[in-house]
């Protein structure tokens, strides 16, 4: 993996998702607290509350600009699934993101290396193959200076909507969440259930 290049992974809860009705999502503070509880045993993963410090919708472009302003000498890698990678043209300044970060694209489903290459060239026709730091890896150089790394990982068919569905139905999600996060679900059961039942 890219572990020899990466100092840690920051997970950024979205403060105000621009594509969702904010009244139907849990309050930022609760989501961030649950994430911190889940990550406590994993020191290389950390929750970053950066987006809560800004007003207005939470756009990836703005978040990455804030990261770069705080750590101008750091190379940032933005980890995302292949469906979101394909949707970058619909994001605010999505096709300009290679100016501020590199991508690590994890396939969801059976995306092949050739399909990743074709997808990348559809998004950026000037994209070209680039030597990968990973043995047998695939990398594309993008306009703006960023790189897109293809990182095939085992696909786990788990989603937040599935966890919500199971939890609301009273079924066990113990195997899907760390105990500390489950405890917070139980502590805030009434308000969480009210919110999730509206989504």
Image: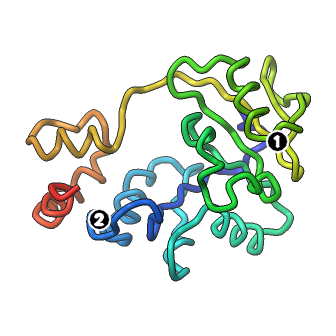
Identify whether 151 is placed above or below 7. Answer: above
Q: Position of residue 79 (x, y in %)?
A: 63, 44
Q: Position of residue 18 (x, y in %)?
A: 47, 65
- At 85% from the left and 43% from the top, the residue drawn is 142
Tell which circle, 2 or 1, labels the residue nearer the N-terminal end: 2
Q: Position of residue 65 (x, y in %)?
A: 72, 69
- Residue situated in front as seen by the camera: 29 or 168: 168
* Distance (Cα) linking label 2 and label 1: 34 Å
- Residue situated in front as seen by the camera: 124 or 148: 124
Location of the C terminus by quadrant is bottom left
Mark on residue 26?
2
Identify whether 109 is placed above or below 19. Answer: above
Mark 1 falls on what kind of element?
Answer: strand
Mark on residue 9?
none
Crowding at dot 1, Cα within 10 Å, few <14 / some 14-19 / many 20+, comes out as: many
Q: Is residue 192 left or right of residue 53?
A: left
Colour pattern of the rendering: rainbow
Mark 2 falls on what kind of element?
Answer: loop
Q: Is residue 110 left or right of residue 132?
A: left
- At 40% from the left and 57% from the top, the residue drawn is 35
Q: Position of residue 99 (x, y in %)?
A: 82, 57
Q: Quadrant of residue 71?
A: bottom right
Residue that badge 1 annotates: 147
């Amino acid at each position: 993996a890219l572990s020899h290049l990466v100092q840690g992974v920051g997970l950024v809860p979205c403060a105000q998702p621009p594509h969702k009705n904010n009244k139907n999502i849990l309050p930022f503070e609760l989501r961030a607290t649950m994430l911190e509880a889940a990550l406590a045993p994993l020191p290389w993963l950390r929750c970053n509350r950066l987006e809560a410090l800004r007003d207005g919708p939470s756009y990836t472009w703005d978040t990455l600009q804030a990261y770069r302003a705080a750590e101008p000498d750091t190379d940032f890698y933005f980890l995302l699934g292949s469906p979101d990678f394909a949707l970058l043209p619909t994001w605010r300044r999505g096709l300009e993101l290679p100016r501020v970060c590199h991508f690590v694209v994890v396939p969801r489903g059976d995306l092949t290396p050739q399909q990743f290459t074709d997808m990348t060239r559809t998004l950026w026709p000037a994209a070209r193959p680039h030597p990968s730091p990973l043995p047998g890896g695939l990398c594309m150089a993008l306009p703006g200076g960023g790189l897109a790394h293809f990182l095939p990982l085992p696909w786990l068919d788990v989603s937040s909507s599935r966890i919500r569905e199971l939890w609301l139905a009273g079924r066990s999600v113990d195997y899907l969440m760390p105990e500390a996060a489950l405890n917070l679900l139980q502590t805030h059961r009434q308000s969480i259930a009210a919110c999730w039942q509206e989504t």
